[in-house]
Image: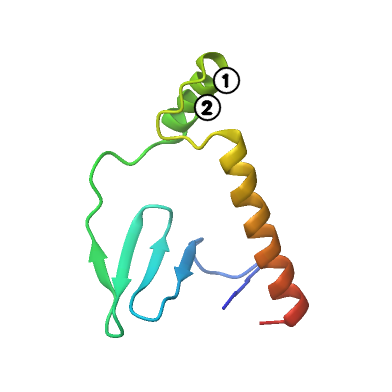
């Protein structure tokens, strides 16, 4: 399901769902992970510090200058993910789902 709202009086949120036969996942606001096995969504505790814009940019600079990919996907991996997301969105647009 893709839901798009523009110019709506609601807080900005992000939700990505991955549906499976035995288990499904929900990622909210890029840092809250939930899992369901057919019942209610349960929070999954995430370890480590949530990155800020500064930490992401620092990781990006390290990748460019040193080839050091701390928690940042390399460019080849990122391009593969981008292509998958674009195919998903074009399929959803074409089918209206």
Q: Tag 1, which secondary structure?
A: helix
Q: Position of residue 53 (x, y in %)?
A: 47, 34
Where, quadrant-wise, is the C terminus in this rendering?
bottom right
- Dot 1 corresponds to which residue? 64
The image quarter containing residue 95 is: bottom right
Question: Does residue 67 lie above or below 55 as drawn?
Answer: above
Q: Which one is in front, 15 or 64? A: 64
* Residues at marks 2 and 1 touching, judged by CB atoms closer than 8 Å: yes
Q: Which one is in front, 3 or 84? A: 84
Which residue is at 48% across, 65% downward?
16
Q: Which one is in front, 76 or 65? A: 76
Tag 1: Cα neighbours inside 10 Å, few (<14), some, or many (≥20)? few
Q: Tag 2, which secondary structure?
A: helix
Q: Position of residue 63 (x, y in %)?
A: 52, 23
C-alpha gap between disc 2 and disc 1: 6 Å
- Dot 2 corresponds to which residue? 60
């Amino acid at each position: 399901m893709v839901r798009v709202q523009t110019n709506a009086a609601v807080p900005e949120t992000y939700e990505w769902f991955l549906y499976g036969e035995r288990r499904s996942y929900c990622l909210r606001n890029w840092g809250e992970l939930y899992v369901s096995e057919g019942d209610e969504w349960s929070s999954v505790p995430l370890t480590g510090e949530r990155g800020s814009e500064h930490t992401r940019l620092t990781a990006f600079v390290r990748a460019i200058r040193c080839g050091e990919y701390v928690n940042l996907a390399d460019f080849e991996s990122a391009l593969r993910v981008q292509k998958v997301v674009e195919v998903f969105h074009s399929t959803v647009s074409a089918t209206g789902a």
